């Protein structure tokens, strides 16, 4: 147990799960998009849908998409800041199978045309868990520096990425691999012990068969 477990996150309230966790979900989704969001559809599930508005979940999610942290005093006015930033958004509800009660599906479009779908949950105390990116199921908390690599499912991709990290002296904490089908699309989720330099991520992007690489430091 650490001090975070005892006192919770530094945040703008009222709720660590419905507010601080929601900010972190929005912020993580923004980083996964790797662009400034231009439009967002946010579909709330479970408790998020039932009580989220009263807890400020809607404003917290938008604050995160704008790049705000959980302790940012602008969170209650995030809708106004979104208008200034040119971010259009709409909220709805959804029933997600086997999802945590505090879950949301975010459908994002960036100002440079990129798109990203993210399912994430706020699991308590300000902590989150990303459970799906686009159509690929996975799980990570974004509490450690995390590298997400989308690639063609082909021999050598895992070894090539691992070699670049090893040559750079990066220690891997956890390494997940998933794919939609043999020879189709795959994703690696690599939690590291230290932040990754942008140049290192760019080297990984340039590998054969790599479609996309994003690091959440």
Image (spheres, grey):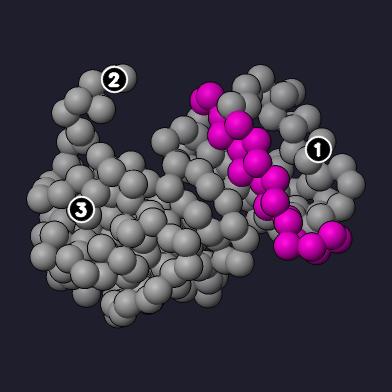
**Magenta highlight: main SS:** strand
What is the distance, in whole Å, between disc 1 and disc 2 at their CAs? 36 Å
Q: Residues within 10 Å of mark 1 (few under 14, many from 20)?
A: some
Numbered marks: total: 3
Percent coordinates x, y for residue 98 in the rendering? 47, 61
Residue at (10% x, 50% y) in the render: 14
Percent coordinates x, y for residue 216 in the rendering? 48, 43
For the N terminus, the image quarter is top left
Residue at (13% x, 60% y) in the render: 55
**Residue 66 shown in magenta:** no
Return the residue nearer the eye: 6 or 133.
6
Mark 1 or mark 2: whose residue is earlier in sequence: 2
Circles 3, 1 touching at the beta carbon (< 8 Å): no
What is the distance, in whole Å, between disc 3 and disc 1 at their CAs? 39 Å
Query: Which secondary structure, mark 1?
Result: helix
Residue at (60% x, 31% y) in the render: 174
Residue identified by numbered label 2: 2
Residue identified by numbered label 3: 19
**Residue 184 shown in magenta:** yes
Is 156 on the left or on the right of 213, as rendered? right
Residue 62 shows in the view: no
What is the distance, in whole Å, between disc 2 and disc 3 at their CAs? 21 Å
Residue identified by numbered label 1: 160
Percent coordinates x, y for residue 213 in the rendering? 63, 50
Mark 2 or mark 3: whose residue is earlier in sequence: 2
Is 125 on the left or on the right of 165, as rendered? left
The magenta segment: 174-194
């Amino acid at each position: 147990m650490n001090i975070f477990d005892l006192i919770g996150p530094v945040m703008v309230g009222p709720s660590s799960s419905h507010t601080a966790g929601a900010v972190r979900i929005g912020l993580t989704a923004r980083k996964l998009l790797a662009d400034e969001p231009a439009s967002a559809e946010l579909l709330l599930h479970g408790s998020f849908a039932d009580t989220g508005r009263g807890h400020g979940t809607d404003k917290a999610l938008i604050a995160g998409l704008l790049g705000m942290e959980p302790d940012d005093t602008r969170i209650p006015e995030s809708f106004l800041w979104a208008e200034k930033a040119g971010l259009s958004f709409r909220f709805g509800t959804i029933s997600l199978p086997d999802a945590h009660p505090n879950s949301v599906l975010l459908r994002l479009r960036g100002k440079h045309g990129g798109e990203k779908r993210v399912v994430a949950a706020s699991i308590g105390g300000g902590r989150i868990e990303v459970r799906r990116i686009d159509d690929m199921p996975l799980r990570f908390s974004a509490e450690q520096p995390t590298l997400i690599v989308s690639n063609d499912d082909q021999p050598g991709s895992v070894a090539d990425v691992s070699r670049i990290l090893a040559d750079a002296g990066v220690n891997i904490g956890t390494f997940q691999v998933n794919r939609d089908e043999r020879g189709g699309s795959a994703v690696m989720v690599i939690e590291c012990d230290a932040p990754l330099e942008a140049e290192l991520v760019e080297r990984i992007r340039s590998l054969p068969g790599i479609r996309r690489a994003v690091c959440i430091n």
